[in-house]
Every structure is written in C-alpha cells, then in structure tokens.
Image (spheres, rainbow, N blue to C red):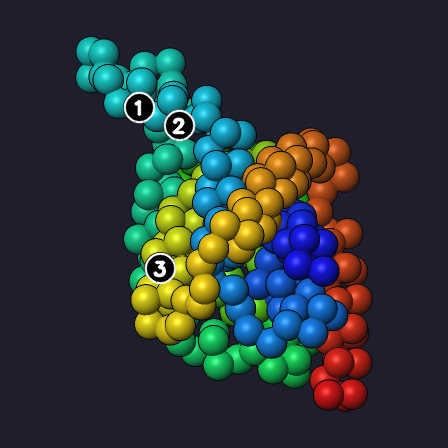
Amino acid sequence: MDFLYALIYGVISGLAEMLPISAPAHQQLLRYLFGIGQTDHLMNLFVHLGLLGAVCLAYRNSLQGFFLGKKRKRGRYGPSAGAVYDLRLVKTATIFMVVVMAASINAAQGLQHYAYLTAFFVVNGIFLYIPQHIRQGNKEARHMTGLDGLLLGVLGGFSVFSGLSRTGLCISGGLLRGADQKSAVNWAFLLTIPAMVVLILFDFGFMAAGTLGAVNFARVALCLLSGAAAFGCGFGAIRFMNFLAVRTGFYGFAYYSWGAAFFSLILYLIT
C-alpha cells in the first residue's frame, strides 16, 4: 500500500501541478481515497524537488538564454533577447507571487474542507473557460508592463488554495492580457520555478514546526519514488501543454475542473 500510494502520489502531483487542474486539490482527494489523514511534508519536499527539476530541464534553453543574454553588446541584448524579456516579466511576477503565497498560506491551510475545494474548482474552471471567448492576442514579453507582471504574480500566488491551479490561472491571465497561447504557457512554467522554491521552503518550515516522524531508509525510498514519478510526469505534462498551446488550447480542462468540483461536492455531502 505504501509503495502504491507513493507512486500514485508522485504521478498525480506531477500531472496536476503542470496541467491546469491544481496539485494540492488532487493530493487532498488522493489522501481521502487512501484513508490518509495528514500531509507528509517530507514526501511533498521530494515531489517539489522533482517538479523543480522537471521545469528546469524543460526550460533549460530559456534559462541559459537569459544568462547569455545578460551579456550586452553595444548597448543591446544579444540573440537571447526574447529569453531576457521573458525572465524579466517572470522576475516582476515572482515578487508579487511570493508576497501573496506568504500572506495566504495560513488561510489556505484552514480552507481544506470539501466545500471550499468545490468552490475553488468551479472558479478554476471559469478562469480556464473564459479565454476561449476572447480574441487571441499576440503580445510578447517585451510588450507586457509591470501591471501585467503584478497580475500574473497575484494569480500565481492564489494557487496555494486547493482547487486553484497556478498553471491555469497564469495562462488565463496572460491570455486575457493579450498574449498568445505559447507565450502564456512559457510564462506560467517559468513562474513555476520560483513557486517550487517557495514551496520547498514551506515544506522545511512545516517539518520544523511539526513532528517529522521516523525517518528511515524505507520512508526516504518511498519519498524518492514519489519525487522521481513527479519529475517524469511533470516533464511529460509540460511537453503536452506546449503541444496544446499550438493546437486546441486548454479550455477542455475547464470541464474537468467542474467535474472535479462535482466529485468534491459529493464528498462534502457524505462526510
């Protein structure tokens, strides 16, 4: 059971974090199905490390381009100017995202009831559905303002609430501000890097504040399994989202979110 739970936990976490369907919400539902009452913050730590590795691997060219682009030539950015503009927008968004995450984490921990989960799933679906009814823009990072960075950061910060997806909110926020789907996806995933760093710090904080429990080889092995599964599935989900960005779009996940809301509502009524 422990092996199966650790494997499924990593798979679900990797997929749900990178797809616009909220990892914390699916982790909560998975714990209910397995009859596990408390969050294992050590397992979450390994999962977040795996997800951080997945997004860094997927966007290694953008990250390399940023650092290469920092070397100016004749007062202008080099060939990596696009990456520099992307990272500049993400840097602005990160400031606001971290502030919102830090200010909201305690409230989010207190809103784990299925009634709140149902409501947040509904809101997440609405955010994913709205962009399909607006005309797609073509704004790049160089045309985005500090206000756009603030919007993306605030939306990303609200993902600490179970049921709200950082990927989904940031993509929809970018689309509503006139970005094309590919750019919006790139910004959402680049913003995942600092988000994972913050969540890793939260994991350490939760472990320091509470009872870590027995740490032995078997438990660490299970956490490593979860982290590896999150890494592989997270990387695959990133590739899939980039595929959807140039194909059908993402509004189909809105129906999934509403279906998850219905499932959460049933749990609310029977528990």
Does 107 sit above or below residue 63?
A: below
Q: Mark 1: which amino acid?
A: Phe
Left or right: residue 64 compared with residue 46: left
Residue bearing mark 1: 67
Left or right: residue 219 compared with residue 236: left
Q: Do the residues labelled 2 and 1 touch (CB within 8 Å)?
A: yes
Residue bearing mark 3: 204
Q: Mark 2: which amino acid?
A: Leu
Please count the marks in the image. Answer: 3
Q: Residue 124: in sight, yes or no?
A: no
Residue 234 horizontal/vertical position (percent): 60, 41
Which is in the foreground here, disc 3 or disc 1? 3
> Which numbered disc, 3 or 2, marks the residue that appears first in the sequence?
2
Does 261 sit above or below residue 227?
A: below
Mark 2 nearby-residue class (10 Å; few <14, some 14–19, many ≥20) = some
Query: Which image quarter holds the C terminus?
Result: bottom right
Does 145 sit above or below residue 201?
A: above
Q: What element carries label 2?
A: helix
- Quarter location, residue 97: bottom left
Q: Residue 39: in sight, yes or no?
A: yes
Q: Distance between the residues labelled 3 and 1?
A: 29 Å
| The one of 105 and 1 positioned closer to us in this rendering | 1
Residue 41 horizontal/vertical position (percent): 47, 62
Q: Residue 63 carries which label?
A: 2
| The one of 113 and 207 positioned closer to us in this rendering | 207
